[in-house]
Image (cartoon, grey):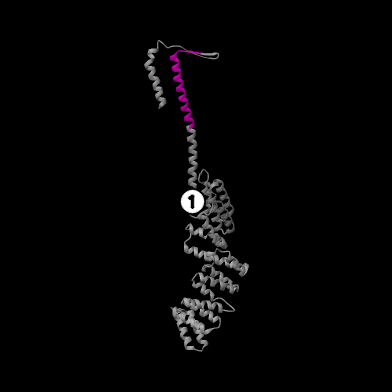
Amino acid sequence: MIRLAIIVAFLAAGLIIGPDIAGRQGYVLIAAGQYTIESTVTVLLISAVLFYLLLLFLEWLLGRMFGLSHRTRGWFIGRRRRKALNFTQTGMQALVAEDYATAEKMLVKGTKGNELALLNYLNAATAAQAQGNDSKRDDYLRQAHEQSPGASLAVGITQAKLQIQQGQLDQALAGLEQLEQDHGSQPALLKLQKEVYLALGEWEKLLAILDNLSRKQLIQDDEKQRLQQQAYEGWFDRTARQDGSEGLLNAWQGLPRKQKYQPDILIPLCDRLIHLKAHQEAQQLLLDGMDKHADNRLLACMTQLQLSDYHPLLTILEKRAKQENSHQLHSVLGQLYLKDNQPKEAEEHLQKAVALQPEARDYVLLAGLAEQRKDLAKANDYYRHSLALKTA
């Protein structure tokens, strides 16, 4: 627009002042070294305008030539992108339809001219594994990393998921631990770590991430408690097999103080100690735990103890029974008195237990004591009560 205005201005000026200067054209001399140019002012001005118009024409011509080249190149690039998109869409549809061979073929074709080839390679790796070709899967994952070096987290997570599906748990674990070092505790990593730790029995590692899983709301409180119980039981089982009761107690000593006497930890620990015949150690832990937590499961665990002298334990529980008149406590006392061969005291506590809360097990024990006294009528009565509770 500006150029057109300049040309129009020159033409207007020529029309206005041209006749006036026709008789007074003037004289111009340009000397440069041995060369001289002589001309009138009018001819010089007309030459300048023509030269400018020539420059504008050349600019337009070059613009058309290069513009055509750019449009041609853009058309080819656009065509490649459209083809890549079509291949990708076909591949994804085949992947959903579980036609893995077609999916792999189309997705790989769709990487050419595709700025998002990373996604094609990741999905092609899934299709390759579905066909049982782990080497091609790993090759596609390598190409994905080369295509987008900054997407190592996405590539690593995809690789770990595929390895877990394939049962390659050790490789998945190594990859996840490296990703954690590089990227921290990402939610997707934590969920995969939980899955691998459970499958491999890496109980200490599972316990270490439970708080993170809960804090990031990846598990609910009830699932956290269940996983914690499972992890402690698995950990104590392995330690008991490998290191015996001494190893179990050392593992327990290494726990944080606030966790040591939690019933969910003490109960599986004492179960393993009792299985290893470390009854005295289990007894002390159960008594210490009861001082800190009123949990009937600790009492129930005491009935598994096999002691050479039950008197200290019975004395402690008798004192507790005077302060706390509970069915569970009287039932445990009755069972322990039976183990200590004190039938009279056992029957007394079992009767108190069924008076507070009838249970079939306690009635069966009472029936056995009645039979020892040859009181068959009473024994049959206890058995009828027990049967009624079992069938209720």
Counting from the top left corner in percent of width and height, residue 233 is at: 55, 67
Screen quadrant of the C terminus: bottom left
Q: Residue reaching furthest top?
A: 23
Residue 207 in the image: state x and y as whole percent: 54, 62
Which residues fall within the magenta stretch? 37-66
Main secondary structure type of the part rendered in magenta: helix
Q: How many marks?
A: 1
Q: Is residue 104 visible?
A: no
Q: Residue at x 50, y 58 (%)?
A: 213
Rendered position, 52 above or below 239: above
Measured as percent of width and height from the top left, residue 17 is found at 38, 15
For residue 388: magenta? Answer: no
**Of 340 and 40, which appears nearest the observer?**
340
Q: Nearer the viewer, residue 212 or 71?
A: 212
Would you name the residue on which mark 1 appears?
92
The residue at the point 48 percent across, 49 percent down is 90
Q: Residue at x 60, y 66 (%)?
A: 250
The answer to whether residue 95 is seen in the rendering is yes
